[in-house]
Amino acid sequence: MTSHPKPWGRCPGHTPQPDRPQRTAPYRTLPDDADRWRLVHRFLHVDSIATVDRVAGLLVLLYGQPLTKIASLTTSQVLTTEEGVRLALGPHPVAVPPPLDHLLLGLTEDRDGALVLGQSTDHPWLLPGTHPGRHRSPRQLRTRLASYGLPSRRGRNSALMDLAAQMPPAVLSEVLGVSVGAATGWAAASGNPRAQYAAELSRRSKSGQQN
């Protein structure tokens, strides 16, 4: 099996590559990477935050996932393998490190949502909502994350910018479930030199199909 990079981002203290080009896109991100990692640390280690909010926040900050996709995750996307817990966000399930793996497993085992007394667990959703049989709404997740100081759109943009700078667009697409075109765009925005190569391959492929 081909080993793919883990979309976990650079931890604080990691020395950046000196030849990496500057970011050029006007995406609205968090003020700086330190803000992102402070929020990551909070969601990882503050037990008083609800598990649902911790998981949602970490999937935004570490995997660049949109709230619409997070809200509609199912328990079948959380996979337990010999190598550990994996989460199927795209065609290639991504490895989930601790303690996020334990948080995800906890949600698969306790899905009453803590929202409605006596709510049925006869549903596939990892994050059940207030209405029986429905998943939690992205709007509610957005409001909850904002209460912890995380603007979800900027947090997601920061994560995607960081991840796109570290891996080829094709890998980013496989593990995060974004289109190759979108992944190539993020790679170009981050200054990843492989983005131009990927875009050229895509252009040649389309040209060959037309001919």
Image (cartoon, rainbow, N blue to C red):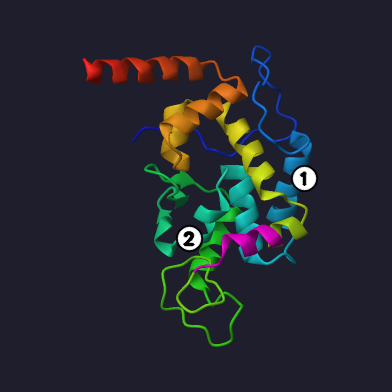
Residue at 23%, 20% in the rendered image: 209
| Quadrant the N terminus occupies | top left
Q: With 200 as the anchor, is 48 left or right in this view?
A: right
Q: With 5 as the anchor, is 210 left or right in this view?
A: left
Pointer 1 residue: 38
Q: Nearer the viewer, residue 17 or 20?
A: 20
Quadrant housing residue 2: top left
Q: Nearer the viewer, residue 131 or 150?
A: 131
Residue 33 in percent (x, y) is at: 74, 35
Q: Label 2 to label 1, Cα distance in Å? A: 26 Å
Residue 2 in magenta stretch: no
Quadrant housing residue 174: top left
- Badge 2 density bin: few <14, some 14–19, many ≥20, Cα 10 Å: some
Residue at 44%, 62% in the rendered image: 74
- Badge 1 density bin: few <14, some 14–19, many ≥20, Cα 10 Å: few
Name which residue type carries label 2: Ser
Pointer 2 residue: 72
Secondary structure under the numbered disc 1 in the rendered image: helix
Count of numbered labels shown in the rendering: 2
Residue 57 drawn above or below residue 191: below
